[in-house]
Image (spheres, grey):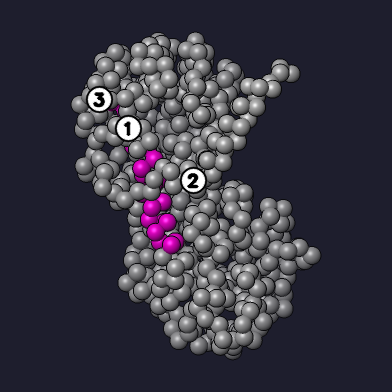
């Protein structure tokens, strides 16, 4: 069962959470020593055959999150886009459902619902801080982490993004994330402006793609490696499927490798 | 050629290229990948679903969980979808209920096996023939009058001699099996199946499915023997290997650079984002010009 990560844990240390779309990936991450896992909206939507444009429901995401959280002992964090609604009642139910799912925290964005529309428009800052306050009031565990993200930087500029992150902190967010702020100097300026831990991401759609060490040096404390994890698995699947459809035979050695891989998967999984 | 029809060409005139390819999937993403790669059909496989959830065996997976995945798969692909019901998730009543729900879901076939142990069909063999036939008959009763086919997995192909296997499979076909999957798929057994013992099954008049083309597990017959061949866990093993490679790289170096990955464009294209963007832009421009509050 997934555990919690106290905000104090991030005060003096950083954490790296790979994004995993399923329980086996989470167990693999735990096995390799990661101290937390993250569920990205893109990756989860993809497993449902959907692009990440706000088509998933709270029920779908919470159930998947529960499955992943149940697979590991390390904390599991989940992307909930805009919280599955803009009213306080919806946000509070989202917090309750994800607490019940066993996750250690959620990430809430200030995009217009549904998320990821063309241009990524954002809601007014007051509307977002109200959502964060509602989420903070709804949580029953103080260690249930609220991560608040702003998508304001590309359209409204760095200063607006910084201003929003400060407002999110004041409203009750434990960690804040300003997406796509630009280059390293902007990232430094952002992180220095915050009073609570900053969330950084390693993901090809959101450059610059920096190594963990660089993000830590800049000052990020909560570092998520997003879609690349799933993309690496998909690359192998796609290659293998194309081999099969082009008539590739199964050699004895390939068959033995399959057997070994299957055995490793079973060993890694729970009985 | 449908994956459910018997070979269009008489025995001996077929070639490996006429053999269809069917792939196990565990979510809608893998189903879409399979379809895009040219696979002819997908099997929603409880064992694969169990592994993706982090469970070692399909024993822990409920029919509801399988149905949920099958629903997403059905919505995501146009190629035939086979829903593996293991041994029916219970007795014949459970199997019938599963069949009813599968029909409503719109799958093209359901698979019901005869195995004693759903997680070790190769080693456990089949249940007594009367028990298996009763379950197949019960399911066929529900499927009658629909276009949903019944695939029966014959686990006893590894444990019976040729005559007994023919008798058993003949009973299954008479009870309503439209396709016989002639070998259990558990890939942990080292021994190869003697393909020669499968030859008499061609006379039963239903398509025979087997393991992937050129599988070293089946000796004495070629891939062309089967109307369709099944890729079981190999694809999932590859997914696992890809995930493992990038997580190891991240754990040891703090970067994911250099690990082969697919691109964001590939993923969004596969998931139909461009069509949604076009629709979104069309809707937004229409709304700006014609929008009136309701």
Residue A80: percent from the left, percent from the top?
49, 30
Residue B253: percent from the left, percent from the top?
21, 42
Q: How far apart are the alpha carbons under marks 3 and 2?
A: 30 Å
* Residue A235 lies in the magenta stretch: yes
Residue B288: percent from the left, percent from the top?
63, 22
* Residue A86 lies in the magenta stretch: no
What secondary structure is marked by label 3? helix
Seen in the picture, residue B151 relative to A221 is either above or below; the reply is below
List the residue tagged with mark 1: A207
Q: How far apart are the alpha carbons under marks 2 and 1?
A: 20 Å
List the residue tagged with mark 2: B269
Residue occupying image coordinates x 53% and y 54%: B31
Q: Chain of mark 1?
A: A
Seen in the picture, residue B61 relative to A205 is either above or below; the reply is below
Q: Are marks 3 and 1 on the same chain?
A: yes
What secondary structure is marked by label 1? loop
In the picture, the quarter occupied by the N terminus of chain B is bottom right
Seen in the picture, residue A174 relative to B137 is either above or below; the reply is above
> Quick check: marks 3 and 2 in contact, CB under 8 Å?
no
């Amino acid at each position: 069962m997934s555990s919690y990560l106290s905000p104090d844990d991030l005060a003096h240390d950083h954490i790296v959470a790979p994004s995993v779309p399923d329980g086996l990936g989470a167990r693999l991450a735990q096995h390799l020593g990661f101290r937390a896992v993250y569920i990205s909206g893109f990756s989860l939507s993809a497993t449902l055959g959907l692009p990440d444009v706000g088509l998933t429901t709270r029920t779908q995401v919470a159930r998947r999150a529960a499955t992943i959280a149940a697979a590991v002992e390390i904390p599991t964090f989940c992307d909930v886009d805009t919280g599955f609604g803009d009213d306080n009642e919806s946000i509070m139910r989202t917090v309750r459902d994800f607490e019940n799912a066993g996750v250690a925290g959620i990430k809430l964005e200030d995009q217009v619902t549904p998320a990821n529309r063309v241009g990524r428009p954002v809601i007014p800052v007051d509307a977002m801080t109200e959502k964060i306050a509602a989420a903070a009031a709804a949580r029953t565990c103080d260690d249930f982490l609220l991560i608040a993200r702003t998508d304001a930087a590309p359209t409204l500029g760095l200063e607006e993004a910084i201003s929003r992150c400060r407002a999110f902190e004041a409203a009750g967010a434990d960690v804040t994330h300003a997406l796509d702020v630009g280059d390293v100097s902007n990232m430094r300026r952002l992180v220095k402006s915050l009073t609570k831990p900053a969330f950084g991401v390693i993901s090809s759609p959101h450059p610059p793609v920096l190594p963990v060490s660089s993000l830590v040096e800049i000052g990020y404390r909560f570092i998520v490696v997003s879609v690349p994890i799933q993309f690496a698995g998909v690359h192998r699947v796609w290659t293998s499927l194309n081999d099969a459809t082009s008539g590739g035979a199964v050699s004895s050695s390939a068959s033995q490798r399959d057997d070994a891989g299957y055995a490793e998967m079973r060993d890694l999984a729970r009985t | 050629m449908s994956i459910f029809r018997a070979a269009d060409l008489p025995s001996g005139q077929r070639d490996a290229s006429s053999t269809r390819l069917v792939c196990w999937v565990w979510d809608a993403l893998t189903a879409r990948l399979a379809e895009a790669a040219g696979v002819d059909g997908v099997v929603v496989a409880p064992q694969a679903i169990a592994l993706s959830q982090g469970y070692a065996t399909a024993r822990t997976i409920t029919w509801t969980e399988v149905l949920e995945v099958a629903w997403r798969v059905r919505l995501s692909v146009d190629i035939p979808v086979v829903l593996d019901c293991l041994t029916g998730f219970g007795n014949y009543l459970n199997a019938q209920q599963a069949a009813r729900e599968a029909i409503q879901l719109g799958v093209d076939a359901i698979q019901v096996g005869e195995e004693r142990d759903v997680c070790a069909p190769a080693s456990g063999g089949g249940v007594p023939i009367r028990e298996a036939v009763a379950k197949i008959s019960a399911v066929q009763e529900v499927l009658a009058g629909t276009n949903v086919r019944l695939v029966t997995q014959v686990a006893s192909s590894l444990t019976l001699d040729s005559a007994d296997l023919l008798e058993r499979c003949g009973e299954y076909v008479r009870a309503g099996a439209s396709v016989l999957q002639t070998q259990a798929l558990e890939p942990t057994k080292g021994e190869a199946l003697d393909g020669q013992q499968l030859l008499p099954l061609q006379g039963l008049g239903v398509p025979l499915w087997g393991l992937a083309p050129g599988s070293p597990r089946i000796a004495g017959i070629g891939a062309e023997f089967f109307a369709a061949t099944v890729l079981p866990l190999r694809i999932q093993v590859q997914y696992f290997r890809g995930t493992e490679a990038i997580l190891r790289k991240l754990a040891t170096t703090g970067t994911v650079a250099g690990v082969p990955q697919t691109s964001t464009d590939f993923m969004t294209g596969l998931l139909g984002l461009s069509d949604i963007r076009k629709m979104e832009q069309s809707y937004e421009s229409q709304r700006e010009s014609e929008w009136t509050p309701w």
